[in-house]
């Protein structure tokens, strides 16, 4: 039955490779999402991301238990019935604001990694772009409009009550079959039709038949998703705990792993907090945490000769950067930080000092700390996940000429150890909950005296130079983005107070 249906599909519509993308600037295109704009035909991974990020492990478990029922209904009753089950299991009782937050800060990263190259070739060539999807519009609209340049997004509308999703859908129901055709008629009217229609399955035929040209996106396992670098707007900032898009099997493994992983994380944190620092490096290796040290760090400052401490200028990947710096050196190095949760302060094996954000107060405090010994600072002010560096604050360059750049990088396979929207106190736990997390600490050469402020260089010149050499070491890109840009994009605030949600300008600047 499946083979017969597939052959009928191919006879009715030509495949997308036969669609020319030349001279389409004045044309309109309407495309389905799963299996068409996206390589993957299943929407489960994206529902699972929302379930975990906005609802937690028990919500993900509920969705996973409901998935077999959704599959049975999908294949034996209707596509609409199966999707209704996924929507109810994911959204019932969830705050609408939490769904919107995940759709803005988390989902775009996963969607962008699954774009179909042939569909994007045609879709991006058209002047007016519309997307139809059976998925809830609230999940997909931000990504499609902000990153793919869609003009109109039509999806299933979820029902809400007092700021929470009910798990039900509004009239006319799931956007499949004839509902998609009706949606096209409501946008284009009865007197005009879209120039191009793109779909991948039988339920897309009703809207495809309304288009002047229609093309099928065949299911081909060998198709590789398009590189996210080709997007008109790159995804610089993203949030969420999950590193990979979860399949049903991966979701099950995550659920089973989390209780064991939390116990393992507690053991690793206890080793870092309670053991002498010279032993921590070896304890981490014994517990599966890989630490690689490159370069030659300077010896400790000698107080007897009046020598001030060295300021280690680090790139910022997680809150654990100063701890792994200390483990690499075999001695505790105090760190200054903009913000740190009470829990992180309590379990930290090194001294942490909060910056007040008052320039004079912070400068005096850092100078005093340097008189006592070595000190670590992350002048980006916040962490970043992509292979880039945020703008370096220049204050540190004015305070000492004893500057040692340190290129920090790490690897996580299951969970991200940073968050902009969640509770930061869990960041160290999530990092250590990875099966085998890794850190690389690369000590660069101490900054020559002629490149410091005492030699006439401005603090901005020094900060920019250090940013460039760390970026070159890591093969990262320098940007002008700041802490405020990140938090406005992901959390709708500047990292300290709540403001109206807004997206930061997404323009990567060269080094």
Image: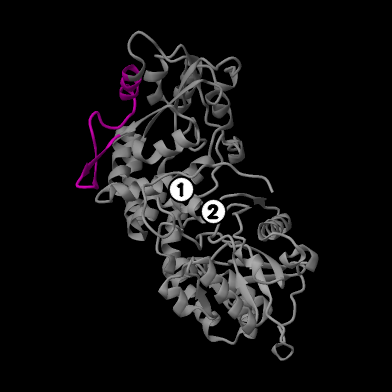
Is residue 298 found left or right of 338 in the rendered image?
right
Residue 315: mark = none
Q: Residue at x 78, y 68 (%)?
A: 449
Q: Residue at x 68, y 67 (%)?
A: 406
Query: Circle 1 sits on which residue?
Result: 489
- Sequence-earlier tag: 2 or 1: 2
261 or 12, which lies in front? 261
Position of the N terminus, as image quadrant, is: top left
468 or 30, which lies in front? 468
Is residue 312 on the magenta stretch? no
State the image quarter where residue 289 is shown.
bottom right
Residue 286 place in picture, x, y as percent: 61, 78
Q: Which residue range is magenta in the image?
A: 157-186
Secondary structure of the residue carrying tag 2 is loop
Residue 264 place in picture, x, y as percent: 49, 74
Query: Circle 2 sits on which residue?
Result: 482
Vertical side of 502 occupied by 363: above or below: below
Report if residue 66 is visible in the image: yes
Is residue 21 found left or right of 61 in the rendered image?
right
State the image quarter where residue 139 is shown.
top left
346 or 164, which lies in front? 346
Residue 322 place in picture, x, y as percent: 59, 72
Residue 140 place in picture, x, y as percent: 40, 38
State the image quarter where residue 296 is shown.
bottom right
Dot 1: within a 10 Å radius of its alpha carbon, few (fewer than 14), some, or many (20 or more) residues?
many
Secondary structure of the residue carrying tag 1 is helix
Is residue 161 on the magenta stretch? yes
């Amino acid at each position: 039955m499946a083979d017969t249906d597939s052959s009928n599909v191919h006879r009715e519509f030509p495949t997308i490779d036969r669609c020319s993308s030349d001279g389409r600037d004045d044309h309109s295109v309407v495309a389905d999402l799963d299996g068409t704009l996206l390589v993957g035909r299943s929407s489960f991974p994206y529902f699972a991301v929302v379930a975990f990020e906005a609802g937690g492990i028990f919500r993900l478990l509920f969705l996973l238990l409901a998935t077999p029922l959704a599959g049975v209904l999908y294949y034996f009753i209707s596509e609409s019935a199966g999707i209704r089950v996924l929507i109810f299991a994911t959204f019932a009782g969830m705050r609408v604001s939490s769904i919107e937050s995940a759709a803005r800060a988390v989902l775009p990263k996963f969607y962008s990694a699954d774009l179909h190259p042939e569909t994007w070739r045609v879709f991006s060539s058209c002047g007016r772009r519309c997307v139809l999807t059976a998925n809830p519009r609230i999940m997909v609209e931000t990504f499609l409009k902000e990153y793919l340049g869609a003009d109109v997004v039509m999806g299933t509308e979820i029902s809400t009550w007092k700021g929470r999703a009910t798990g039900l859908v509004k009239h006319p129901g799931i956007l499949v079959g004839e509902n998609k055709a009706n949606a096209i008629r409501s946008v284009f009217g009865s007197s005009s039709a879209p120039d191009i229609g793109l779909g991948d399955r039988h339920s897309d035929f009703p809207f495809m038949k309304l288009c002047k040209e229609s093309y099928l996106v065949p299911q081909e396992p060998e198709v590789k998703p398009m590189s996210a670098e080709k997007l008109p707007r790159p995804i610089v900032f993203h949030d969420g705990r999950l590193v990979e898009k979860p399949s049903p099997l991966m979701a099950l493994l995550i659920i089973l792993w989390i209780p064991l992983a939390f116990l393992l994380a507690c053991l690793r944190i206890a080793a870092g907090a309670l053991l002498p620092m010279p032993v921590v490096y070896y304890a981490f290796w014994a517990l599966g945490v890989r630490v690689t040290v490159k370069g030659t760090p300077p010896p400790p400052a000698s107080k007897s000769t009046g020598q001030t401490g060295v300021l280690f200028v680090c790139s910022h990947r997680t809150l654990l950067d100063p701890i792994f710096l200390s483990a690499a050196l075999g001695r505790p190095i105090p760190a200054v930080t903009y913000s740190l949760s009470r829990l992180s302060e309590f379990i930290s094996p090194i001294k942490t000092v909060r910056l007040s954000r008052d320039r004079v107060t912070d400068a005096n405090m850092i100078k005093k700390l340097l008189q006592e010994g070595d000190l670590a600072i992350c002048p980006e002010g916040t962490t970043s996940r992509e292979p880039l560096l945020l703008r370096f604050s220049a204050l540190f360059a004015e305070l000492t000429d004893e500057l040692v750049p340190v290129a920090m990088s790490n690897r996580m396979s299951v969970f991200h150890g940073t968050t902009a929207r969640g509770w930061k106190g869990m960041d160290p736990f999530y990092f250590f909950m990875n099966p085998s997390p890794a850190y690389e600490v690369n000590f660069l050469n101490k900054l020559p005296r002629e490149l410091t402020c005492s030699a006439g260089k401005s603090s901005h010149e020094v900060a920019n130079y250090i940013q460039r050499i760390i970026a070159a070491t890591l093969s990262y890109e320098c940007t002008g983005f700041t802490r405020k840009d990140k938090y406005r994009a992901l959390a709708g605030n500047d990292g300290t107070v709540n403001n109206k949600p807004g997206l930061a300008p997404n323009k990567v600047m060269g080094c």
